[in-house]
Amino acid sequence: MHRNEHCGQTIRERVMLSLMALEVFTMAAVSVRDLDDEVKDRLRVRAAANGRSMEAEIRAILVDAVNDTKESVGLLAALEDRFGALGGAELDLPPRATPPRAASFTP
C-alpha cells in the first residue's frame, strides 16, 4: 500500500473519504410541470408573507407534508374510530366440536 504523509492514510482511503463527503452534500432536485398560474401566484404571495423565496417556500411545504407529527394509528384503531359510532355486532358463535390443534406444515 502506498501511504502518503497526510494522516497516514492511503491514497485509496483519502479518495473514498472524499467521495463519501461529496455524497453527504448532494441534494435531490424536483421539477413540477404544468403548474397552474394561479397556484404559482399564490405560492409567490405565501413565500413573500413568510419572508422566503418561492423555492424555500415549496421546500418548507414539502417538508411539512411528509413530516407527519400525528402518532401512527394501527388499522384496527383506525377502523374503530371510523365505524365505532355505528355500533358492534353480537355474534352467537357455536361451541367447538373438537379442541383446537396446532397447524401441520408437512404435506
Image (cartoon, rainbow, N blue to C red):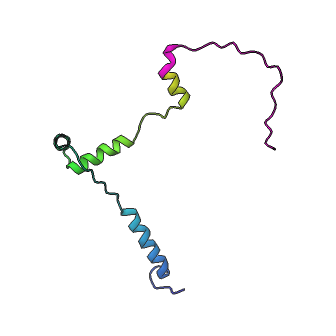
What x and y, as percent, mark residue 42?
Answer: 18, 40
Prevailing secondary structure class for the magenta stretch in the rendered image: loop
Asked if 90 appears above or below 35 in the picture, the reply is: above
Asked if 71 appears above or below 34 in the picture, the reply is: above
Task: Name which quarter of the figure residue 40 lies in.
Answer: top left
What x and y, as percent, mark residue 18?
Answer: 41, 72
Identify which residue is drawn at 80% across, 39% down: 104
Q: Nearer the viewer, residue 70 or 106?
A: 106
What x and y, as percent, mark residue 5?
Answer: 45, 85
- Which quadrant is home to the C terminus? top right
Residues rendered magenta in the picture:
82-107
Q: Is residue 45 magenta?
A: no
What x and y, as percent, mark residue 68?
Answer: 41, 38
Q: Nearer the viewer, residue 97 or 15?
A: 97
Identify which residue is drawn at 82% across, 31% down: 101
Seen from this angle, which residue lies furthest front? 107
Q: Is residue 103 magenta?
A: yes
Task: Name which quarter of the figure residue 94 lies in.
Answer: top right
**How many labels were placed on the picture?**
0
Q: Nearer the viewer, residue 46 or 86?
A: 86
Identify which residue is drawn at 45% across, 72% down: 17
